[in-house]
Amino acid sequence: LATEELRSQDWSELKLNQDGLICAHIDYWHCSKLDVVKQHFFPKTPLARTALKKNR
């Protein structure tokens, strides 16, 4: 499933090196890692269920 189909409030933090280039990308979630994984196996939206069936 594409990440845009997941339902979670999250944000990303980008860290820059001395040259101003991205050297780290950290994602933060307002839910447990298990909740994110469960959405792949138990989707609640019709679009997500369709995508899941196509990927099997």
Image: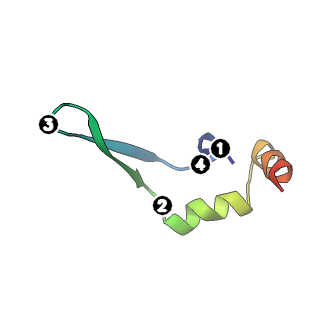
Q: What amino acid does circle 3 point to?
A: Gln
Estimate how packed mark 4 is, as few (under 14), some (14 to 19) or many (20 or more) residues with alpha carbons within 10 Å.
some
| Residue drawn 40% across the image and 44% down it | 11
* Helix, strand or loop status at disc 2: loop
The outermost residue toward the top is 20
Residue position marked by numbered label 4 in the rendering: 7
Which numbered disc covers residue 18?
Answer: 3
Disc 3 from disc 1: Cα separation? 33 Å
Residue position marked by numbered label 2 in the rendering: 31
Which numbered disc covers residue 2?
Answer: 1
Q: For the residues carrying marks 3 and 4, which lies nearer the camera in this image? A: 3
Left or right for 48, reference 26: right
Residue 23 at x, y percent in the picture = 28, 43
Left or right for 17, reference 52: left
Residue 13 at x, y percent in the picture = 32, 44
Left or right for 20, reference 48: left
Q: Are the residues tagged 4 and 1 within 8 Å (C-beta)?
A: no
| Residue drawn 74% across the image and 53% down it | 44
Disc 4 from disc 2: Cα separation? 10 Å
| Residue drawn 73% across the image and 55% down it | 43
**Which badge, 3 or 4, is on the more N-terminal residue?**
4
Q: Are the residues tagged 4 and 2 within 8 Å (C-beta)?
A: no
| Residue drawn 19% across the image and 39% down it | 17
**Which badge, 2 or 3, is on the more N-terminal residue?**
3
* Helix, strand or loop status at disc 1: loop
Q: What amino acid does circle 1 point to?
A: Ala
Disc 4 from disc 1: Cα separation? 11 Å
**Which badge, 4 or 2, is on the more N-terminal residue?**
4
Q: For the residues carrying marks 4 and 1, which lies nearer the camera in this image? A: 1
The outermost residue toward the bottom is 34
Estimate how packed mark 1 is, as few (under 14), some (14 to 19) or many (20 or more) residues with alpha carbons within 10 Å.
few
**Which badge, 1 or 2, is on the more N-terminal residue?**
1
